[in-house]
Amino acid sequence: MLLVTANSCTDLSEDMYDRVGSGNFVQKKDNLMQVIGSVYAKAHNTTLISWFFPQELTADQILTPTRGIHGYNAGEYLRLNQHNWSNLDRGATMAWTENYQLIGFANHVLAELPGTDYTKLGLTDADKKRHMAEIRTLRAYGYWHLLEIYGEVPIVTSVEEPVKAKNTDQEVFDFVVKELNETLPDLPLKSETAPPQGLYRVTKAFNRFLLMRLLFNSEAYIRKPMYDETRKLADEIVSGVYGQYALDNTWNGPFTHNNANSGELIFAFPIEKGQRDEKGWWFGGFHHYQSHLTFGSSYGGAGWNGWGLAPSITAKGEKLNYKLGMPFSRYHAKDLRKKPWNYLGNGNFEGMFLQGLQLAFNKKDTIRGVEEYKGRPLVLVDYVARTSEGDAASGSMLKGEENTGIRPVKVCPVFPDVESQFEAQADQPEMRLAEVYLTLAECELRLGNKERAADLINTLIKRNYAAADWGNAALALPVTAAGLDAGGYRMLEEWGKEFIMEGRRRTDLIRWNKYTTDLWFDHNEPSAAFRNRMPIPFFAMNANPLLIQTNGYN
């Protein structure tokens, strides 16, 4: 990166800097925070489209149907869903670019901070240690992403290193563990930082949360299960060893405009209108061209009608027959999340889905279609079929229409123009205590403690129901130990319902050995086991002759 400092428009003697965080650049604390902030910004990038594509669009819950002339994209979405991608497909390759950019920025900063005189900036050596620990933890976060997607990758810790061959998955795993353990002592607790920095900056809880994720999925990474170690760590996080956190009372508390106040959030990427605002990306990807009329929002323009929930039924109303996928049908009719989205005013909304007949924000005018249903009422459906042409066949994602798919309203939700003060204020959650509860529950299940597993799940999910319904024995809403099957389908259902749209589905399916062996809509046959990992991108192989392609992709 080139950083230029100019005193005036006519001064042609500016100093030129060839690295982020050059010692000449860091002249005051604000400069230092900009340099550190650049690494956080790159970390945020790794959680967006490059993560969403492999984690959600190759799994069973989110679908990108071909909608007439839209969405085929040279077959890339079909290849992702059917596990036929190559090392040229962006869904298989973007994570490489984004995470090595994060690692590169981190390495630049880590090379500069030791030589920075913190006393001249009004800071202390303890501040320097904290900043070094933050950046190393964020670098480990990038390597965890790479381990998750690719397995074996080169470990690069210096901007001066030449190109190098891949490290083994065990070496990458061990490197991340080492980095996290060494940096833990120099990181603060949430309570030791001024709000809201405890949410937006790396803390001890962030560090341990990342280690928990690593250990939890170790069998997929290094072929060694570590559920006992994961359980211990998750128990410590829940009990407050690394800071005080608490489950939110409502399902949408961690997602709404003031979610920075939710005790459930351990870490979030900040969103601010006019600064860092990813609402348009989340909105555009999932919502219909006319959905802004439903939300009463002109901010960010219209959706581009891409993603939606994978179907649960056929166009004839018959329920599909898959053990996975069919996400909308997995929510009980009494689940508060299954209600149609409805704005209640003052920043409050209910329901997690746009579904059925779509009305304008005034609840009076009917939204009309613009393509297959041009001029006709827009009804979002839970099936894939060309019913506008009289074709009720429901077996292919190539047969979508503009109304195909229920649409989730969750991450970075939309707020109406009449209360624009809430727009683009919902931060993007990355680490939630809910994940710790379900991680702990699954560990207990795998270690034979099914009763405690059920109790932990119920502690989390009871917020999704009215108290009267939860206590109604006839509805049988609480999860029971007997209902937790050894195959993991019930556990996967709870993971899916809680974290739909949040970019972890592929990980959970792999952990339960379902990703390549099981079936879902238009993924009608098992895929080869090597598909559990993505290929080394074509451009990376061209740039580095020492890289050897992942087995199976040769």
Image: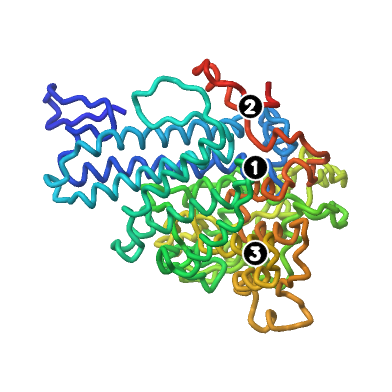
Q: Position of residue 318 (x, y in %)?
A: 88, 56
Residue 362, picture quadrant: bottom right
- How dense is the environment of label 2, judged by Cα within 10 Å: few (below 14), some, or many (20 and up)? some
Using the image, tell me which numbered label, if any, was put on residue 550. 2
Amino acid on which the number 2 mark rests in the picture: Thr
How many marks on residues? 3
Q: Of the residues under marks 2 and 3, which one precedes in the sequence?
A: 3
Using the image, tell me which numbered label, if any, was put on residue 444. 3
Using the image, tell me which numbered label, if any, was put on residue 223. 1
Residue located 23% across and 52% down the image? 126
Foreground mark, 2 or 3?
Answer: 3
Could you tell me if residue 50 is visible in this image? yes
3D distance between C-alphas at marks 1 and 3: 20 Å
Residue 149, picture quadrant: top right
Q: Of the residues under marks 1 and 3, which one precedes in the sequence?
A: 1
3D distance between C-alphas at marks 2 and 1: 17 Å
36, 550: nearer the viewer: 550
Q: Position of residue 19 (x, y in %)?
A: 28, 29
Amino acid on which the number 1 mark rests in the picture: Arg
Question: Left or right of 380: which side holds 89?
Answer: left
Q: Position of residue 82 (x, y in %)?
A: 75, 36
Question: What is the quadrant of the C terminus in the image?
Answer: top right
Question: Left or right of 309: which side holds 349?
Answer: left
Check disc 2 and report its element: helix, strand or loop. loop
